[in-house]
Amino acid sequence: MYENLAILAAVVLIYSAAAGRVGRSWLSGPILFTGAGLVLGPAGLGVLDLPLSAADLRILAEISLAMVLFTDAAHADLSVVRRIVGLPQRLLLIGL
């Protein structure tokens, strides 16, 4: 249990240390975390083993999606959104 938490904390710490360089490259945070999960998880080195049920996985996916969408919305250029207000309204209507 604590080993998994320590590994996850180390991945977040390494990402935080390199976040400035990552922001200027073509890589994104979700891509790096997915790669770290593949390398450290059962499909890779097998170091990280998190027993998740389907309900746990759904909650984790919803939280991750909310964080990604919030981050994207925080970086949106509002002047552009105001000029083309019809497109975001249609996309939100389709999403709902």
Image: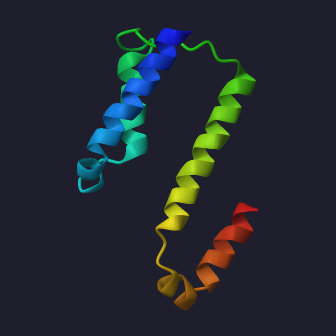
Considering depth in this image, is 23 or 82 the residue closer to the camera? 23
Q: Left or right of 81: which side holds 90?
A: right
Q: Position of residue 52 (x, y in %)?
A: 65, 17
Colouring of the image:
rainbow
The residue located at (73%, 70%) in the rendering is 93
Residue shown at 36% from the left, 14% from the top: 44
Q: Report which quarter residue 39 is drawn in.
A: top left
Image-based side of 23 in relation to 46, left or right: left
The residue sitting at 49% across, 14% down in the picture is 4
Location of residue 17 in the rendering, given as x and y in whole percent from the top left corner: 29, 40
Name the quadrant of the C terminus.
bottom right
Q: Report the side of 92 relative to 48 (left or right).
A: right
Specify the farthest residue to the bottom. Answer: 83
Which quadrant of the view contains residue 55?
top right
In this figure, what is the number of numbered marks? 0
Q: Is residue 25 above or below residue 34?
A: below
Which of 14/94 is in front? 14
Residue that appears at 41% across and 8% down:
46
Return the x and y of residue 9 as percentages of the image width and height.
44, 26
Q: Is residue 85 above or below residue 36?
A: below
Estimate the x, y position of residue 80 in percent, counting from the top left: 48, 84
